[in-house]
Amino acid sequence: MKSPGSEPWTVRRLIRWGSEWLEKHGIDQPRLDVELLLADAICLNRMGLYLDMDRPLDKVELAGFKSRIKRRSQREPVAYILGKRDFWKQSFSVDSAVLIPRPETETLIDSVLTLYPDHGATFTILDIGVGSGAILYSLLGEFPRTSGFGVDLSAEALRVAEKNRDQLNLKDRVTLFNGDLTAPLPKNQSYSLIVSNPPYIESSELEQLQPEVVEQEPRLALDGGEDGLDIYRRLIPQTFPLLNQSGWLVVEIGYNQGKSVAALFAEAGYKQVAIVKDYGKRDRVVIGTK
């Protein structure tokens, strides 16, 4: 960043300068990102920026903003820079060990709420590939009498899940396991609901994704194999015997995988299999019951 000279670096000036800088580096939403990073650097929200556009930054605040902008210009996701991401009704800690929660995944939450309209119900939820815990903990927030179990192959991802669990005061309701799919789970435990957002991107398509995704987010949470369905072929039949008789399996899918994943549900013995579309009218979730 050039020397400010005699003109102070105000909020207004930094938003203008930062937006131009990020645009030159190929960032899709430069102004939004600048506002989020600037607000974080000076401990305000975005509305606070607009209420005090002529506020000058001191040296410490300016250094903090410069550091954040540099990281973003190198295509590090904003969520990792901030160390958090909003999802559903809460904010979750995230870092490069976990996939960043995305708005389309809220379709999975909506699907579960449709299946379980009684928020006072008592049941057990299993999240396979729990990551940050965003899905599981959002559901526990909607159903205060439920208990949850989460599994992840990545020990580093579980570290993030544990952090979010403790921050949300869910330690007495959540048990986490490290391992591959259902392998580490207790043999005598059954579940009323199993949810999962497994890796489903075709291996050949990974390099076509934005650098923020393919170079920054964990490949383990993205790569679904040659046709994107590797994990589904293992996950779906493994979950069937773990469900209670009236239990449901709810999984997120890629926009072009609805029919293929639904067929795997039927092959495993699931009934009432349905494909749910997201807010953009694309296939996003498959559900089925035992």
Image (cartoon, rainbow, N blue to C red):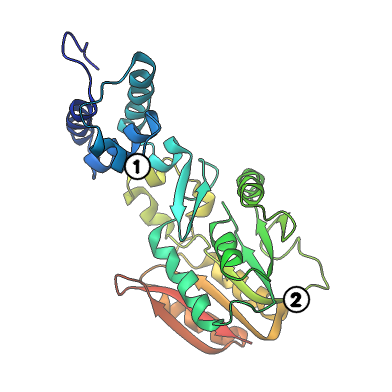
Viewer-side residue, 51 vs 224: 51
The residue sitting at 44% across, 64% down in the picture is 105
**Residue on which the image places disc 2:** 190
Helix, strand or loop status at disc 2: loop
Q: From this view, report whether residue 148 is shown above or below residue 41.
A: below
Amino acid of disc 2: Ser
Quadrant containing the C terminus is bottom right
Quadrant of the rendered structure where residue 280 is?
bottom left
Quadrant of the rendered structure where residue 279 is?
bottom left
Among all residues in the image, which is located at the extreme front?
A: 51
> Does residue 264 appear in the picture of this structure?
yes
Task: Give the foreground label among 2 and 1.
Answer: 2
Whether residue 278 sits left or right of residue 115 in the image: it is left
Which circle's residue, 2 or 1, is located before the other in the chain?
A: 2
The residue sitting at 25% across, 37% down in the picture is 51
Q: Which mark is residue 211?
A: 1
**Residue 39 rendering spot, x and y as whole percentages:** 34, 35
Mark 1, residues whose alpha carbon is within 10 Å: few (<14), some, or many (≥20)?
some
Viewer-side residue, 11 vs 251: 11
Whether residue 88 sits left or right of residue 183 in the image: it is left
The residue sitting at 37% across, 21% down in the picture is 61
